[in-house]
Image: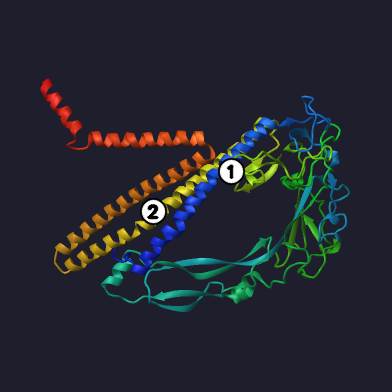
Amino acid sequence: MDGDSNVQNPCSILGVFMCGMCVFFPASVFLTGWNEHTAVCRQWALQGAEDNHQVLDCAQHATDTAGAALEPGNLGFLSCNVNQSTFKKFTEKDFVGVAGVTGLFGPTSPAGAAMTMTVQQWQCEEFCAREECTRRLGEERNLEVESKGDGSQRRLLTSRKKDGDASERQLKSKGKSCTNRCVEWGYRRVLAAAELPAYSTFNDQGEAMRSCGSYPGPPSVKLGTSDSHAAAGQVGMLPNNAWTVNDVQLQELPIMVAVPLPSRRLNTTPTSFRPSDALAVDNTLVEMNTLKTCIGNGMGCIEISFAKAAPVHMAMLGAVSSVGGMMSAGGWAHDAYWLCKGEGAYNNVDRVCPMITVVDMNKGVVSCGEDITSMEQLMTVLKDANSQKMWGLRLLGFILFWCSFNCCFHPIKQLMGFITNMMDAGTDCIPCVGGCVDCLTDIFMSVVSSVLTVVSFCCAAASFLSVVVFMWIVMRPAMGAALAVVACCFCVGAGALLNSYRGGGKGSRDYDDADYDSE
């Protein structure tokens, strides 16, 4: 039967049970409770933002659009076009490593609110070219060398299998103990933004050298992405720069506009690049808006590209700063409420659009573009992020509850498996009977597994809903009490239905007697 090799020793069974009781169950209770707490508090903060915000005037920062005076700390919403003449003009001196490439951007320096430089290098990468599945334990494995058509060689890990006994063949046929093992390694050149492992860590250093070539080492300029931003208060809004952008808002702007570079070639074609060389005009060229140290994909050659942020329209939500015409970098915090702390991250309201995608455990996954022009649109984005985070973590919490009860019921399944194994072993030598018993025990174990899965699902649902209702009673007593009443009504109704339609019940007998008398 399929469960022959699934019965574990008592220590393993106890370990699974304790894992469910001491790890999964407490984790699921904590995660579900924390999720409901932060979701309610975030909802409270967003509701407060809707009720207390002021719509700011792009032309001045003394009053809002309704004429009410602005005070530092007030929550304000601003939606304006950007004055692109206030953008910073970037040069090669704004980035470390390319200052020697004079005139990198040509006679006209690119302007933007922020710019990034991405440095990549051609390096050698090891990958698994072929895998095989090892189905039997204790088999002989030998390393052999196979000649390839081009005269080179590759190392293969082969398995010399021996005929085993009936139990081993059965184990193999059912795919037990199957592990994937790489039996052939490959090597290729890749353009990477981080330094890859050295040849000394490869499985076949000689093949790596033949396939990729010699690696000269990391370049003088740092691999990866570096950025440069305009100064706080530099980028202004139309019509007269009455409002400007702070440091935090500049950091959150998406940098996606490619920066063109004037095409430039070298008189001689470089064949290699020494890592210690500093980048300059005489050892670099420009192809397809990319600064390169050599032509092609030679090992060690580097490629550098640039991108900038140049938004046309921006929307901002946050606390008005004491510095006129700017919002506070710390955001706006709603008043504390019950268990919702005023200094909690879920209570902070501070957003700029457009913005990069931000993943926040307290606020959800937030992203917005230049199409946000009203407070209603921005609040929809923030509320949707909170709702998606809440339901996503609810699902995760329920799965953890389910896993915990599955672990708790694991000993029962193992006990049933042990009993059926004994029955199979006792009847295995009886012709025909052994096969029938094996089939019946398989069916029995399938039924047991299904029943335990359904029972664990029901227990997980009950535990999950209990934590949710309890948290809502604590956070929002009125709504939590209503949910508890609804849940109790469902439970009472289900019990009443079971009692009414159970076989031989009084209700069913009375109905039958009455029906008989009427006839």
Q: Which colour scheme is used?
A: rainbow
Tell me if mark 2 has few (under 14), some (14-19) or many (20+) residues whose alpha carbon lies within 10 angstroms of its own.
many
Tell me if mark 1 has few (under 14), some (14-19) or many (20+) residues whose alpha carbon lies within 10 angstroms of its own.
few
Of residues 45 and 394, which is closer to you in this image? Answer: 45
Residue 284 picture location, percent across and down: 81, 61
6 shown above or below 208: above
The tag on residue 339 is: 1
Dot 1 or dot 2, earlier in sequence: 1
Quarter that holds the N terminus:
bottom left
Of residues 201 and 322, which is closer to you in this image? Answer: 322
Residue 33 visible (yes or no): yes
Looking at this view, name the residue that lies furthest to the top.
Answer: 518
268 shown above or below 341: below
159 shown above or below 173: below
Q: Distance between the residues labelled 1 and 2?
A: 30 Å
* Identity, as a three-letter code, of the amino acid under mark 1: Leu
Of residues 256 and 272, which is closer to you in this image? Answer: 256
Residue 385 visible (yes or no): no
Tell me if 438 is positioned left or right of 93 in this view: left
Secondary-structure class at tag 2:
helix
At horizontal 26% and vertical 72% (from top left) the residue drawn is 166
Tell me if 295 is positioned left or right of 404 in this view: right
The tag on residue 405 is: 2
The quadrant in which residue 448 appears is bottom left
Quarter that holds the C terminus:
top left
At horizontal 38% and vertical 55% (from top left) the residue drawn is 406
Observer-side mark, 1 or 2, equals 1
At horizontal 73% and vertical 68% (from top left) the residue drawn is 218
Secondary-structure class at tag 1:
loop
